[in-house]
Amino acid sequence: MALSPMDVTHLAAVDTARAARVLDEVRSAALSGQRAPVAPRPVIGQSWERMLRSGVDPDRGLRSGLLSCEEVQRRRESSTLRHVLPVLREGLLSVADVAHHIMVVADEEGRVLWREGSPPVLRKADGLGFEIGADWREDVVGTNGVGTPAVTRRPVQVFASEHFVRSHAAWTCAGAPITDPRDGRLIGVVDVSGPLETMHPATLAWVDSVAKLAEARLRERHLRSLERLRAVAAPVLARIDGRALAVDRQGWTAAVTGMPYLERLTLPKSVSAGMRWLPALGRCSLEPLAGGWLVRAADEPVTRAATRIVLDLREPRRRSVEVSGGAGSWTRELSPRHAELLYLLAVHRAGRGAADLARDVFGDPARTVTVRAEMSRVRRYLGPLLDHRPYRFAESASVELLLPDGPDAPFPHATPSDPADLPPVPPGVHAAADR
């Protein structure tokens, strides 16, 4: 009788050796193009397809150089993950050590920054290159419990030959992404790994629950910092007649006066005191506060004249939008979803309705609520440079689109369901080589 992917999952819980043999046959069939005895789980099958497209060697993989001790320390000190490391240790390490597991914490780029747990398992991990400073992105070492959750943005358990690279088949890994609760940005992945015989079906739920606890701790920390800033800013704002707000160093609003509440104010990457042009308010004065900035809006209308917008999609992990005009320029890194939406608006200069964008991005025109929520977030930093009904860039803005080299679109799924609906690429689109 044929097994289903769920049957293999249950089998792994009671007979790891047999489940490992079945998965080895599945992997071999997938790599050779033959019919497999059972289909891989969807999350694993999709990862294997990505590996085949990117050219990862299934027999050897690829080991990139380790980060220097100095660079590891620099990343540790600058990573938000350092604030939740005690939560991760408390929730995972005591059990991991007894169960012959190790806990691994990697940053958003897949670099291993912390690794603790059972000493014998740590030594075995060294043999795989699973060590401090190693690069465990999916497109470097194949399907794994660090890189795959970072790509899918969901918890993933990888058992035996579900690992794309053969040398990892003696391991079981369960990893969960950790995101910044303020904006949903990926900040890292926590993973529990060990030898094949340590596999347990509850491990993934355990790791995910601790990751969510870490995100909750970050949320509490953020709210406490805003409360402290609000207490500092309250007497200052009370003496101001015009529009003003107090924001933290990342632009999150603690308090406002003379204007509607704004959840977040987009600040330049390098912030200093003085007059600045900000997309949501126009010309403003910035004054330092303990823990943030006092922003006073000048009584001038926000101008949209002679604005140049550069949407840079050349690097998948470093997509950004740059806005420049007479009042200065600023750059913001984009989440994958925001980059995808702005790409569609750059290609469709006449605009796209919410249903059109939902169809383009999700293949479902009914998902307009999700699209409107995302576009609302985009408008927080692009402000008057985006019009709506339909969503589009302002006519006064010059939009330049920088694309990666090669024939593939930066977002293969972000196209209309009918290719005939896709307009010709507008003037001003450049590949990386043309920059």
Image (tube, helix red, strand yellow):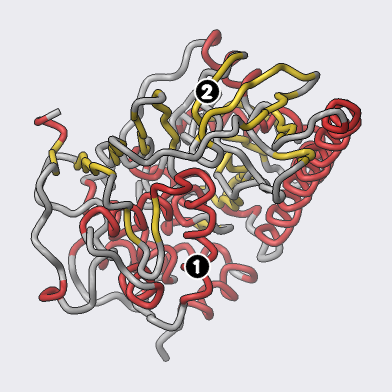
Cα gap from disc 2 to disc 1, whole angstroms: 29 Å
Amino acid under label 1? Arg
Q: Nearer the viewer, mark 2 or mark 1?
A: 2
Horizontal and vertical percent for residue 117?
A: 72, 33
Tag shown at residue 405: none
At horizontal 44% and vertical 65% (from top left) the residue drawn is 43
76 vs 144, left or right, is right
At horizontal 71% and vertical 64% (from top left) the residue drawn is 202
Task: Check the image and report above or below for 401 versus 409.
Answer: above
Horizontal and vertical percent for residue 27?
A: 33, 62
Task: Check the image and report above or below for 62 versus 205.
Answer: above
Camera sees residue 197 = yes
At horizontal 28% and vertical 46% (from top left) the residue drawn is 396
At horizontal 59% and vertical 50% (from top left) the residue drawn is 184
Tag shown at residue 372: 1
Q: Report which quarter residue 74 is drawn in.
A: top right
Task: Check the image and report above or below for 36 versus 78.
Answer: below
Amino acid under label 2? Arg
Q: Residue furthest bottom?
A: 1
Dot 2 or dot 1: first in sequence order is 2
Q: Report which quarter residue 274 is drawn in.
A: top right
389 vs 432, left or right, is right
Question: Mark 2 sits on what residue?
Answer: 276
Instruction: Label 2: state its secondary structure.
Output: strand
Out of 377 and 314, give the one closest to the viewer: 377
- The C terminus, quarter of image: top left
Out of 347 and 300, give the one closest to the viewer: 300
Camera sees residue 60 = no
Instruction: Label 1: state its secondary structure.
Output: helix
